[in-house]
Amino acid sequence: MTPVWEGVILGITLAFFFSFGPALFAIIQTSIHRGLWSGFQLAFGIFLSDVAFVALCFLGAINIINSQESLFGIGSGIILVVFGFVTFTRKAHMETDKDENNSSAPGPLTFILKGFFLNIANPFVWFFWMGVVVTVTANYKGDTQSLLLFFAGTLLTVLVTDLLKCFGSFQIKKYLTPKFIQWINKIAGIGLVLFGIYLIIRTIIEF
């Protein structure tokens, strides 16, 4: 089996068995609340953060983060709590064509950065990529071409599945009422806050 297909298999496994975290909440909530295009932008931001993680692991810069693990863990938890609070308090709003053309609506960079930093704030993600990079590098004996093909397959597969999640969430939007969307906002917000609090407590206990 070629490195590309091995990467695709890992990407599918990651997308469907290890994706139940803050990023998934955000993708579903954004696609329903802000529209399909905004969901795509958020997913692209998450994709860019995964690319950055892999690059950092290869460069060894992840060791800097590990040396400041306690500070990073608390900071990540606070970021997730803030994201969760904003999501919980957001009023339900059904996106329309008029809204998408409204200049006051958040621009693409806003959603891309939100996806990027939301994923960055999850230490489980960078621990995961660090482990994968070490294992795969050893498996391919440091062959650069094989590694590039493997991670290209993995990262692009994760991106495609995230885009499909956006599309699926947007498709069910037509069947949802503003009250139901408000509940989705609250559930997503609570999930983010609880995950952030968990990170803070776990970091303090380990410290």
Image (spheres, rainbow, N blue to C red):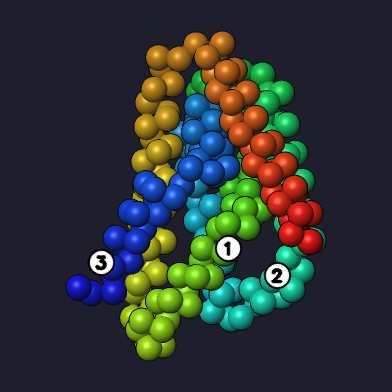
For label 1, the SS is helix
Residue that mark 2 sits on: 65
Relative vertical location of residue 168 with respect to residue 43 in this rendering, above or below: above
Work out how far the residue at label 3 is from the one at label 2, CA to CA, in angstroms: 31 Å
Q: Amino acid at mark 2?
A: Ile
Residue that mark 3 sits on: 5
Q: Is residue 38 left or right of residue 207?
A: left
Work out whether mark 1 precedes mark 3 in sequence or the reverse, and give the earlier one.
3
Query: Closest to the observer: 35 or 58?
Result: 58
Q: Is residue 103 visible?
A: no
Residue that mark 1 sits on: 126
Q: Is residue 147 left or right of residue 81?
A: left
Query: Closest to the observer: 193 or 144?
Result: 193
Percent x, y of residue 3: 29, 74
Q: Residue at x 40, y 76 (%)?
A: 136
Q: Quadrant of residue 87?
A: top right
Q: Is residue 62 left or right of residue 150?
A: right
Do the CB atoms of the residues marked 2 and 1 lie less than 8 Å apart? yes
Query: Closest to the observer: 121 or 191?
Result: 191
Q: Is residue 104 left or right of residue 18?
A: right
Q: Amino acid at mark 3?
A: Trp
Q: Can you tell which of label 1 and label 3 is closer to the viewer?
A: 1
